């Protein structure tokens, strides 16, 4: 009988863990941050997540943080491209640059 009573408890704890993880991920979306916060998070962690207009959550990683990326040299064949995300105060917040 213990197994039967422990199973619902384990299921409830697992579901609560998923809900907490989902909530934490939602808190880390650039859409909930200011542009300055998104830039700082990308600089410190090397990645952020953003929700697109269609509702898809995209991880953004790679590239050089915006502050250092202004002087990025890509060579003759490549051009410097900004990486922008949506934040609560800007539709296009440049957080990084890539080649």
Image (tube, grey):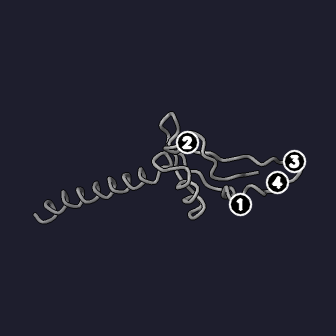
The residue to which callout 4 is attached is 74
Q: Quadrant of residue 42?
A: bottom right
Q: Which residue is mark 2?
A: 90
45 versus 89 height, above or below: below
What residue is disc 3 on? 77
Crowding around mark 2 (Cα neighbors within 10 Å: few <14, some 14 to 19, many 20+) is some
Q: Earlier in the sequence, mark 2 or mark 4?
A: 4
- Mark 3 and 1 residues: CB-CB less than 8 Å, in contact? no
Q: Is residue 11 left or right of residue 1?
A: right
Q: Residue at x 66, y 53 (%)?
A: 96
Tag 2 near tag 3, CB within 8 Å: no
Q: Position of residue 64 (x, y in %)?
A: 69, 58
Report if the CB atoms under discs 4 and 3 are less than 8 Å apart. yes
Secondary structure under badge 4? loop
Circle on res. 91: none
Residue at x 50%, y 42% (from the top left corner) = 51
Q: Secondary structure at mark 3?
A: loop
User: Residue 45 lies in what quarter of the image?
Assistant: bottom right
Alpha-carbon distance for marks 2 and 4? Answer: 27 Å
Residue that mark 1 sits on: 68
Give percent across and percent down for residue 20.
33, 56
Residue reaching furthest top? 54
Q: CA distance from mark 2 to mark 1?
A: 21 Å
Circle 2 or circle 3, nearest the eye: 2
Q: Is residue 49 left or right of residue 78?
A: left
Mark 2 / mark 1, whichever is N-terminal: 1
Q: Residue furthest left?
A: 1
Q: CA distance from mark 3 to mark 1?
A: 21 Å
Q: Mark 4 to mark 1: distance in Å?
A: 13 Å
Image depth: mark 3 or mark 1 in front: 1
Q: Quadrant of the N terminus?
A: bottom left
Residue 95 position within the rendered picture, expressed as x and y whole percent measured from the top left? 62, 52
């Amino acid at each position: 009988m213990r197994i039967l009573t422990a199973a619902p408890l384990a299921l409830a704890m697992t579901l609560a863990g998923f809900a907490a993880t989902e909530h934490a991920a939602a808190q880390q979306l650039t859409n909930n941050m200011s542009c300055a916060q998104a830039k700082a998070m990308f600089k410190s962690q090397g990645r952020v997540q953003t929700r697109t207009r269609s509702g898809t959550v995209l991880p953004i990683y790679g590239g050089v943080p915006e502050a250092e990326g202004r002087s990025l040299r890509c060579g003759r064949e490549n051009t410097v491209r900004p990486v922008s995300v949506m934040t609560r105060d800007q539709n296009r917040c440049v957080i990084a640059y890539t080649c």
